[in-house]
Amino acid sequence: MVPIRMAGAAAVACAILAGCAQYRALPRPGYEAGGTEEMSSDQVVQTDFNRTLTISMRDNLAGLMSLMTKLYKRNPREWRKAGQPDLEAAAEAVRRSIDARTPPAGLAGLRDVEVLAVSLDPSYQGDRVAAFIYGLADTIIAAHDGKTRFFAFDLLDGQRVYNAARNVEAAAWLLNTRKDARGTLLLLANEWTPEQANLSFEREFGALIGRLDLVANLLGENTRRIGINYAQNLLLFSFLPVR
């Protein structure tokens, strides 16, 4: 019976390891928010909390893709700066740069908030939308220890995620206020007319900030509960099962 159990355990372990190896060969998660993901082998080594973090990251990336499309539509001159044939090609180039964590052309060596700062510098001559969205994405990913999917042994710092939320707030404010020497906004975002107000950008930023703040709070609570559970086990002499 013991050899059979050992063989079964070995088979499960091999399956988990194979799943992890398979995941590493796959691209980062897609950018389509909403719904649930199809079952995959890497989910075997994810806790419920890991799934929450992974889905939150997926939705944050999807939100950034939505922001990018809106910004390119309001500022078509930006995607033309990069020599792209159309908006879709420009958007795909930004997605690839985020996946590879390689900043847009002309910004090599810069990361996260550094790219974000350059994107809203009046002297910058490149594609501001690409730099702005890449900077936001890299800031959020960096705050999550450089990961977009999370597993049982991943340890994240809630303070860094909280800081990322504040950076997104600052970026949203700068987007709506930063102007060039002629007093023209560097990028057009929210649209105000006598007939209507288009606040879709505000909603996207609000959703991003809300998810990041929630994750920061959950990380703090998760760390606190780990300590409490450990202390309770010691007080109650609760041994861990071995079979």
Image (spheres, rainbow, N blue to C red):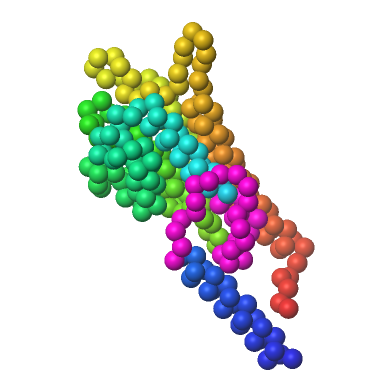
In this view, 18 is above or below 121 = below
How many numbered dots are placed on residues in this image?
Answer: 0
Q: Quadrant of the C terminus?
A: bottom right
Q: Residue at x 24, y 17 (%)?
A: 181
The spot of residue 59 in percent (x, y) is: 54, 43
Magenta span of residues: 25-54
Q: Residue at x 62, y 61 (%)?
A: 39
Q: Which residue is drawn at 44% across and 28% down?
A: 172
175 or 195, nearer to the observer: 195
The spot of residue 242 in percent (x, y) is: 71, 77
The spot of residue 183 in percent (x, y) is: 29, 14
In this view, 208 is above or below 236 = above
Q: Is residue 15 left or right of residue 161?
A: right
Q: Is residue 60 left or right of residue 180?
A: right
Residue 226 part of the magenta-drawn span: no
Residue 48 part of the magenta-drawn span: yes
The spot of residue 19 in percent (x, y) is: 54, 70
Is residue 160 at all visible to an observer of this figure? Answer: no
Q: Provide the major secondary structure of the magenta segment.
A: loop
